[in-house]
Structures are given as structure tokens and as C-alpha cells.
Amino acid sequence: MRAMVHHRFGSASAVLQLEDVPKPAPAAGELLVRVKASSANPYDWHFIKGQPYFIRLGPSGLRRPKQPVPGGDFAGVVEALGDGDTGGFAVGDEVYGFQHGAFAEYLAVAHGRLARKPAGLRWEEAAALPLAGATAWQGLRDEGGLVAGQRVLIVGASGGIGTLAVQMAKAWGAHVTGVCSDRHMELVRSLGADEVIDYTRDDYTRSGERWDLVFQLGGTEGPRAIRRVLSEDGTLVQCAGDGDRFLGPGRNVIVAMAMNRFVSQRLTLVNTREDTPTLDAIREMVEAGELRVILDSTVPFEEAGFAVELVETGSPGGKVAISGVE
């Protein structure tokens, strides 16, 4: 089969190349999926560049990539089943989910990491949902404990996760303020945000306002600064944010964990699980008309490296999708 492969660390456009690699066979409990589309995430460029450097001590590989086929999000068709329990899926089912190695023609996936594709979505739209949607859902609901009537601030509201988080928070009855650049303000308003802050002109950490929940998906602000805008018993949920090449956003995470023991607010982190129950819940929101997918652009499979670099440096509005192998 064909796949995008990298044998060394570096910028995606420089190291990713199209190669023929062995087609995977589904193990027990797995499904073989013919990938119709995928999408780019910060997850991808972290693995392709091997940055922040601490990930090379684990899943990335120290000197060269342990998993040379990158990618995670996918949407496609079940082509074969492994032995044992495969979650009730059948050959021919249209599915979406998350599994490392998605920049490929075929992908072997554990049945608990995918779900039936939302009806009515194009392949590229469905492939934009798994990681971003699961992160938004779990960050707001599971970690943030969002309830109707709360004031929610979403930092990075125009990105892949943010565009979904704004819609989810509104669907669940929150008053939503989005933080983004001026060129994406109208997009964020169109998704239902009650207020939008242009971070290039206004510093929300010195606004004097208070929010019950801050969901940080980007930006340079540390937990000490964000505490200024949290209500007395408010919650900061960190997902990403900018950082250095050694620890990435990990420095802010460490500071928040240390502070959490001594402050009245709750400072926490979302560790995303791309599991079937979460993906099913997202599908239900899409099919109910409560959630729409925002695509900044769609690129051919051969340009997957460009898609990854656009996510890394281009600040797209929504997700960047990658069409499947033709």
C-alpha cells in the first residue's frame, strides 16, 4: 500500500515522502480500514519533528522515528475484521476514529478507537472530528465540569479544537467568550460565541472579567496569569498552549500541577481518549445539527506535509483535511 513515511525527524514537507509499505493485517479485536480521508493535528508535527524533545524518550523514538507512518485522524470503510470481538462492526461499515499511522492507504484499528461515521458528512469532514472533537468534549465536560449558565472562555477558539468547543459549550448552555486573532473573529461569532476577544489587541488576562471555566488551547499565557480571570472556584483546563522545544507546553502544565494544591481554583489538564463512546456522542451532536465541522482547507494525500506545516505555522481557521489515496 502507499503511505506517507518519514525516516528522520524534521519539518514535515522536508522529511515526509510517499512510499510503498506493507499492508497491515488486523490482529484480534482490530479492523482493517481503507482510509478515505485524514486530517492534520499538532500531534502530527510533534511526532514528525520529534519535538518537544522529551517525547523522544517515549513514543517518538530517540534518534529516528519509531513509527515512520504518521497521522492519527481518519475516516474510511471497514475492509476486513480480525479474530475475536470487533465491537459489532462489519465489513463495509463507514467509520471514523483515531489511530497512529493514518497517513496511509490502509490502517489496522482496535475496535474501541473508532465509531460509525456521522451521517451526511463528507469523508474529509468526518476525518476532521476524532482528536479535536474528543479533546473538546472531554476538556469541557469531563475535566471542566461544564454546566448550563456558566461563563466559559476558550483560548484558541478558531482552531480545530476551538471551533468545536465553542459549539459544544453553546449547545450545553454556557455563555461563551472566544479568544482568537482578528482575521478569525467573524468565524468564531458565526459558531455562536457571545463575545470574541482579539488577542493581538487586548490582553484578556488583564480585562478585569471573570470566567467559571477557561479552556486553554493555545497562547503564551501561563497559569499564574490565567488565574486572574478565573472565578474564586473556577477551573482552568489546559490542552496545549505555546512552549519551548524541550518541554513544549509541559512547563505550564508542571506549574499548574504544583499550584493546584495551594489555590481555590482547579488547574487541570485534558488527556484525550479517542474512544467509541466519545466518538458516538460527537456523532449524535453532528446528526442532531448541534455541531458542524469547519474546514480551513483540504489538500491531496501527496501534500500531507504541507497540511501538517499549515497547522504548525499557519493558524488555520478550523481543520486542515487530507484526501485519501486516489
Image (spheres, rainbow, N blue to C red):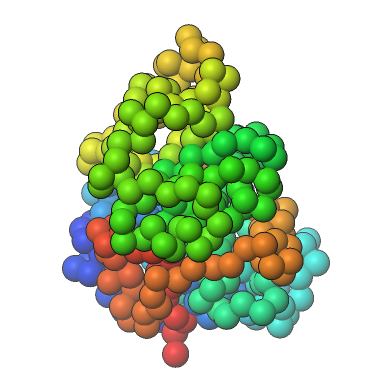
If the image is split into quadrants, where does the N terminus sit?
bottom left
- Across and down, in percent, residue 261 comes to 50, 12
Q: Position of residue 304 (x, y in %)?
A: 34, 73
Q: Is residue 188 left or right of residue 133?
A: left
The residue at the far right in this view is 88
Residue at 36 percent of width and 21 percent of height: 224
Q: Position of residue 199 (x, y in %)?
A: 31, 45
**Residue drawn at (67%, 37%), measured in percent from left and top?**
149
- Location of the C terminus by quadrant is bottom left
The relative height of residue 301 versus residue 15 in the rendered view (above or below) is below
In the displayed structure image, the side of residue 257 where residue 174 appears, left or right: right
Q: Is residue 62 visible?
A: no
Compared to residue 208, the image places residue 318 above or below, namely below
Q: Residue at x 40, y 26 (%)?
A: 208
| Res. 259 image quadrant | top left
Residue 177 percent location from the top left of the image: 48, 44
Can see residue 187? yes
Asked if residue 302 is positioned above or below residue 53 in the image, the reply reads: below
Say left or right for 23 vs 244.
Answer: right
